[in-house]
Amino acid sequence: MELHTIKPPKGAKKRKKILGRGPSSGHGKTSTRGSKGQTSRSGRDFYPGFEGGQSPLIRRMPKRGFTSRFPTIYQIVNLKSINRLNEDTITPQLLWEKGMIKHKRGLVKILGEGEINKPYKIKAHAFSQSATEKIAKAGGSYEIINV
């Protein structure tokens, strides 16, 4: 085998579709573009939501509310998850090490789903009202970390 004898495998090279070369070619007359209209013309250009000149759905829908460009995104941890840990002090660093949150430097919020039966000292960036009540009821304490 030498370089001048190497060929691509059978079926690897496909012939270009030749258009508009008469009826016997199979791609004559309309050149596979169907019949008349905007889509059969060259240079046609319209976006995915285009509705033929009718006012598009996205413009007919009412615009309400407000979406912040800089939202505060918390990583959620429930009390039932904390109850499984055998630690007295719970911090975001510990939660990250145990794989309970994804981002080491992200904000953490403790929610009150589930029960705790041990007095934990929990440090986080935010707490739900039900979580603070359950922590206090169990004899633990909570501390809000300021960023």
Image (cartoon, rainbow, N blue to C red):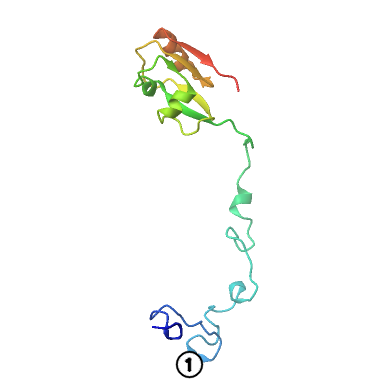
- Give the residue at x 45% y 82%: 3
Relative image position of residue 82 (x, y in whole percent): 39, 21
Q: Tell me if mark 1 has few (under 14), some (14-19) or many (20+) residues whose alpha carbon lies within 10 angstroms of its own.
A: few
Relative image position of residue 106 (x, y in whole percent): 53, 30
Q: Quadrant of the C terminus?
A: top right
Task: Give the answer, above or below, for where 92 lies relative to 10.
Answer: above
Residue 127 in the figure: left or right of residue 64: left
Could you tell me which secondary element the residue under label 1 belongs to?
helix
Task: Give the answer, above or below, for where 82 lies relative to 100.
Answer: above
Label tally: 1
Q: Can you tell which quarter of the image residue 19 is in?
A: bottom right
- Give the residue at x 46% y 28%: 76
Which residue bears the numbered disc 1? 24
Please state which of residues 54 and 88 is positioned toward the viewer in this rendering: 88
Q: Quadrant of the N terminus?
A: bottom left
Relative image position of residue 85 (x, y in whole percent): 36, 21
Residue 6 in the figure: left or right of residue 42: left
Residue 7 in the figure: left or right of residue 49: left
Please state which of residues 11 and 54 is positioned toward the viewer in this rendering: 11
Amino acid type shown at disc 1 = Ser
Please state which of residues 68 and 55 is positioned toward the viewer in this rendering: 68
- Give the residue at x 50% y 24%: 109
- Give the residue at x 63% y 34%: 70
